[in-house]
Image (spheres, helix red, strand yellow):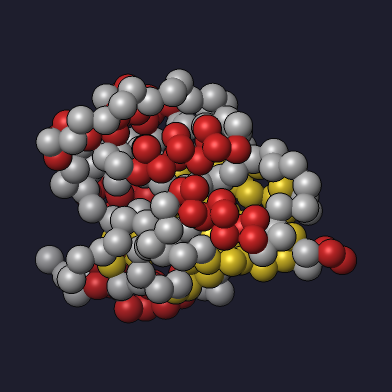
Amino acid sequence: MGIDMYEHFYAVIMAGGGGTRLWPLSRKARPKQMLRLLDERSLFQTSVERLAGLFPCERIFVVTVAEQAEELKVPIYLHPADLPLWSVDGGASFFGLDLEPLPPPGPAFEDGMHLHCGALDFEVLHLPGHTPGHVGLLESAHGWLFSGDVLFAGSIGRTDLPGGDYATLMDSIRNRLLPLPDSTLVYSGHGPETTIGRERRSNPFITGGWG
């Protein structure tokens, strides 16, 4: 079954009175369409300071990030370990793609750093394996983990692409993600949401039921 590469893009909406919710954008929307959908719903009440799109530094995803950053005039965060991939357009040539040169990234992601958005506090987790510099974003107060392409409901991220390594990915899952509380909600790049506890009990890559 084919997977839409834009399947999951979440907007974190901070409502009046301190309320917070996740709002998934149209899975088929291109970057400018995503921004237009937000604007039509009056979700941009003030200037946008940071747009955190958690995409692997690979292939066409880098174009998505570059388009969003240009549209909103916000910096691109990137882990230094993914700079080699970024410099070759995310390995686009591996798939026969000829992309426009990417803009230089801005601030560097560092493991353990915190990104503050209103009352929300996102901790950056370095989760290599899918790519060398892949990161996740953990908001502990709400029990949210944005896992990118590391952990899915019933599966894991690919490691057969440039920069991928299966043993490293499994080490990230076992040593960085499984220690999180079972109730932690996992929002990944593809597929339905899940929890750490559910994956601990039933994910065949974790329980040993696969391979």
- Residue drawn at point x = 16 percent, y = 31 percent: 93
Can residue 33 be seen here? The reply is yes
Percent from the top left, x then y, of residue 205?
25, 66
Percent from the top left, x then y, of residue 53?
50, 47
Indicate whether 185 appears above or below 118. below
Indicate whether 13 appears above or below 98. below
Task: Please state the total of marks drawn on the protein image.
Answer: 0
Can residue 177 be seen here? The reply is no
Percent from the top left, x then y, of residue 49?
69, 38
Q: Quadrant of the C terminus?
A: bottom left
Indicate whether 203 appears above or below 188. below
Percent from the top left, x then y, of residue 158?
23, 53
Q: Quadrant of residue 29?
A: bottom left
In the drawing, does residue 127 fall left or right of residue 118? Answer: left
Q: Quadrant of the N terminus?
A: bottom left
- Residue drawn at point x = 20 percent, y = 66 percent: 2
- Residue drawn at point x = 35 percent, y = 43 percent: 61
- Residue drawn at point x = 41 percent, y = 43 percent: 64
In the drawing, does residue 12 fall left or right of residue 172? Answer: right
Front-most of residues 169 and 68? 68
